[in-house]
Image (cartoon, rainbow, N blue to C red):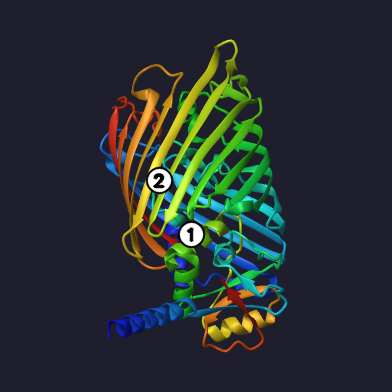
Amino acid sequence: MKKILVTILFVASASCCTRHASAQAIIVNPSVKATEASKAELREIFSGAASSLKDGSHVTPVLQKGGAAHEAFLTSIVGKADAAFRVSWRSLVFSGQAVMPKNLDTDAAVVEYVAHTPGAIGYVAKDSGHDGVKVLAVH
Amino acid sequence: MKRFLAIAAAMLMGAVVQGHSQSLDELNVQIHGYATQGFLYTTNNNIFTTKSSDGSPSWDEGVLNISAQPAQKLRVAVQGRYFVLGNFGNKITVDYAMADFKANDHFGVRFGKVKTPSGLFNETQDIDPSYIWALLPQSIYPISSRNSLLSHFGGVAYGSFVLAHKLGKIEYRGFAGQRTLSSDDGYFVNQTEAGILLPNGTHQNMFGGAIHWKTPLPGLMIGLSNIKNLKGSDTVTAGNGAISGTQSINTFNLPNYFAQYEKGKYMFAAEWTRIPVGGSLALPPVITQPIHLDLRSWYVMGSYKLTDKFSTGLYHGESFDRKATLGAARYSKDWAVAARYDFSQFIYAKAEQHFIDGTSIGYDTNLNTGGLKPTTKMTVLKMGVNF
């Protein structure tokens, strides 16, 4: 009985963690050669510290204004709250080091933009449609 | 009154646009900005050329930033600023106006009037919305000289490399050009009030570099920078222009060593610098005197985000001139306790209490005619809006 309970708990926690880790999908325009990216790479890209993935693919990030995918992305990839995340982008803009990434309202808008913009990279809820974009494996 | 109306209008505009910064898609043009209104109160002494011992709202700022990205690797940007703090500023200046070509993550260049990437905060010291602090540590980032030290005419080369064996990442900057300290810069305020003017300010040719090592420990960055200021001389006048002479400054190095650690809701940082300046002031036949100072300055700071909207922080900064005579005018020590509340993504308020010991930073003669008391408590309040 004890063994069964432990197994159930293990399966339940694994399932919970898996759901959290894959709450959002990282999508890129099909022109981007890369098929995978590490969390560290994505953190650099979406914080403005880098503009290309490890394989040399140049990418331009697009953000969401809010929502579940945005919150999940900040928590699991960037490691910052929304306010701190936007403050760091403002610092880059006002110090002349970057332009503010495009901010879109919905998953659908992000998919649409990424699909039609060479080099674009964004994040959407995993269960949203992915027509015309490529999903990166995140490790 | 006119000034307050201008700032109020800027704040209103910021509130109205509510972050819908105008992005002109076809031209990739973006417009951003911010405006702040500060208030100073000191228990002793008047600081930053304001009548702060009576309470002074004479601290306003408005910034407009326009950038465009006509090609993937090319950006152009210009940023203008209206700044007034007591008798400082009260004019519009250009923070930077530059073209940036980024070949890849390893190499990029900027030309024009560009921000000088020295120290931990020099490039960003003017960006009020970025900080919990109403005033950065004055020991290294004096607000009365901020506009002069922020940028230079010339160029910056920059890039980054990921180190092998998971040793982290190196970000580098190399820069060269000419930096101008305007005639009303804070460094010259007491000299100016004594009737000795630098009508054209000072022009320093300089070059330097900076290295930021993002260590394998996530959130920890260790860095150093150095600026080599080359020997130069500038015109100086006295007696309302009746006497003319030269102020010469010898070549000197301006090193900064710094570290920053950010993890979750915490941020810690520390920085040390030295400003060893030698030269001479010659106004024959009246004055010929050497200039010598050797400032050693540092600070440590920490902040904590209590909630998404409310942050607190504490720092201690010190500066002392090893060449100065003993006394309170030789040094400045400052404890600051800060709090910031973000009403929304675009509007925030800051409150800060300073406990200042020593008189070497921030004071002028004309507004402290009765002499300076060695210690002062200073309260700072600030409202800001950005878009």
Subunit that carries the residue with mark 1: B
Would residue B72 appear left or right of B92 to someone viewing this image?
right
Query: What x and y, as percent, mark residue A14?
Result: 41, 79
Q: Amino acid at mark 2?
A: Leu
Would residue B184 appear left or right of B175 to someone viewing this image?
left
Q: Amino acid at mark 1?
A: Tyr
Choose top left, top right, bottom left or bottom right for residue B385: bottom left
Query: What x and y, as percent, mark residue B200?
Result: 62, 32
User: Which residue reaches farthest left?
Assistant: B43
Query: What x and y, as percent, mark residue A101?
Result: 58, 69
Would residue A99 appear left or right of B13 to someone viewing this image?
right
As displayed, is residue B285 above or below residue B209? above
Describe the element under mark 2 as helix, strand or loop. Answer: loop
For the residues beneath circles 1 and 2, the answer to whether they share a chain is: yes
Would residue B184 appear left or right of B315 to someone viewing this image?
right
Q: In front here: B96 or B171?
A: B171
* Residue B34 disc label: 1
Task: Quickly name the residue at label 2.
Answer: B135
As displayed, is residue A120 above or below residue B383? below
Please say whether residue B324 is visible from this viewpoint. Answer: yes
Subunit that carries the residue with mark 2: B
Name which residue lies at 57% across and 53% down: A95
